[in-house]
Amino acid sequence: MTIEEARKKIDELDQQIVDLFYERMNTSCEIAKVKAAEGLDIYNPVREREILDKLAAQHEDMELYTSRLYRTIFELSRGYQRQFVKAPAKIREQIEQLRGHRELGLPERATVACQGVEGAYAQMAADRLFKRGSLMYMKNFEAVFDAVDKGLCQFGVLPIDNSTNGSVKQVYDLMAEKKFYIVASTQLFIKHELLAKKGTKLSDIKAVYSHDQGLSQCSQFLKTLSPMVQILPSDNTATAAKFVAESDEPVAAISSHNCADIYGLEKIAGDIANNANNYTKFIVITKDPTLYEGANYISLLLTTEHRPGALFEIMSRFAALDINLTKLESQPIPGEDFEFMFFFELQASVMDDRVVDMLAELERSCETFQFLGNYTAL
């Protein structure tokens, strides 16, 4: 058989497959109507397992590929059936409330909590997001969550991911504990400098202070310093700069150029980050769910059954709706034996009914389901 003949044969088979797939999906629709009438769940793992076992016995040499194909077909079928079987779920009521109380955008004037002191990168992110924000500075990330929860401020601004150093683990740990909603996000270019009191030489420095993230993002530069120089963590890059300004010792801070102006320091070394394209993503949190116009990202916290394929089944639901997954972060569940919770960031909107149906199914099928908000990147 020539390649042209083989391709013609493939074309004929593809047409048969499409015709049969169309017929299968229509039959799936009829099944969905029966399930809706009888109050049955869309997902029937026993039935799916029976089909996979039967197909595997017919062509053992293609078992792996057949299994992958039919798992995808099952998810597509479930996705199609969800249009006809509306799963009851709390998330539906919550989203209806969100849809009915949409806002045009973040208010220009607001009380905003962020970690650190004047000059912190979180402060720069807050200034970008709120034109006339009244800032409250907190000692740590947990205090930001608590200030929002107790109503001491309207919003909190927190770093969540860095393009060089990855996730800010402390924030992800707290996200699993605290009650909050994400209403916006933004990316800030991070330009680290080594700051010290005026007249201090690089060779004089006995210690360098910064936040763990700052130290990690500048690890290559720090390796060039004398091994006698101590590398010490601080609560925040701006807190480190303030400490250096108040210290009588020849010490330095990895911080922003803004902090040099604020605390009367000078740059000893510039552009010291490992990666010149160094960005940190910040999220804006509130106590109550709010939906702003143009919101096109959704964040979720989920836990699944501890079994093979459980995470795949969740992700295949996103794929079935052609939803782009932009972030997947896992965190161990305290007290559990190597079990994890998962944070998802999706490019999607609750204004899409298909997305709402999917969220309702996730709420029903996942052991833990937490909707963290629908927001936009500013």
Image (cartoon, helix red, strand yellow):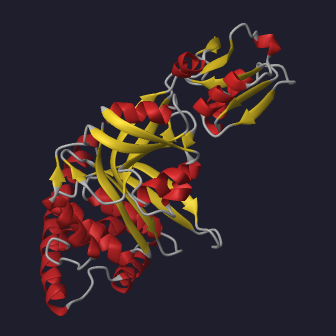
| Residue toward you, 204 or 49 | 204
Residue 76 visible, this orientation: no
Q: In this orientation, which residue lies closer to the viewer: 356 or 136?
A: 136
From what the image shows, is residue 53 above or below residue 259? below
For residue 339, above or below residue 152: below
Q: Position of residue 230 (x, y in %)?
A: 81, 29
Residue 42, relative to residue 327: is it above or below? below
Residue 81, percent across and down? 19, 74
Corner quadrant of residue 165: top right
Q: Quadrant of residue 15?
A: bottom left
Residue 319 relative to residue 368: left or right: left
Q: Position of residue 373 (x, y in %)?
A: 32, 56
- How far from the left and from the top, in percent, is residue 218? 65, 27
Q: Residue at x 29, y 49 (%)?
A: 375
The image quadrant that residue 105 belongs to is top left
Q: Is residue 341 left or right of residue 216?
A: left
In the displayed structure image, the side of residue 75 where residue 17 appears, left or right: left
Position above or below: 301 against 279: below
Image point (33%, 69%), residue name: 70
Q: Nearer the viewer, residue 241 or 320?
A: 241
- Residue drawn at 40 percent across, 74 percent down: 366
In the displayed image of the protein, which residue is found farthest to the right? 228
Give left or right: position of 277 versus 31.
Answer: right
Residue at 39 percent across and 57 percent down: it is 151
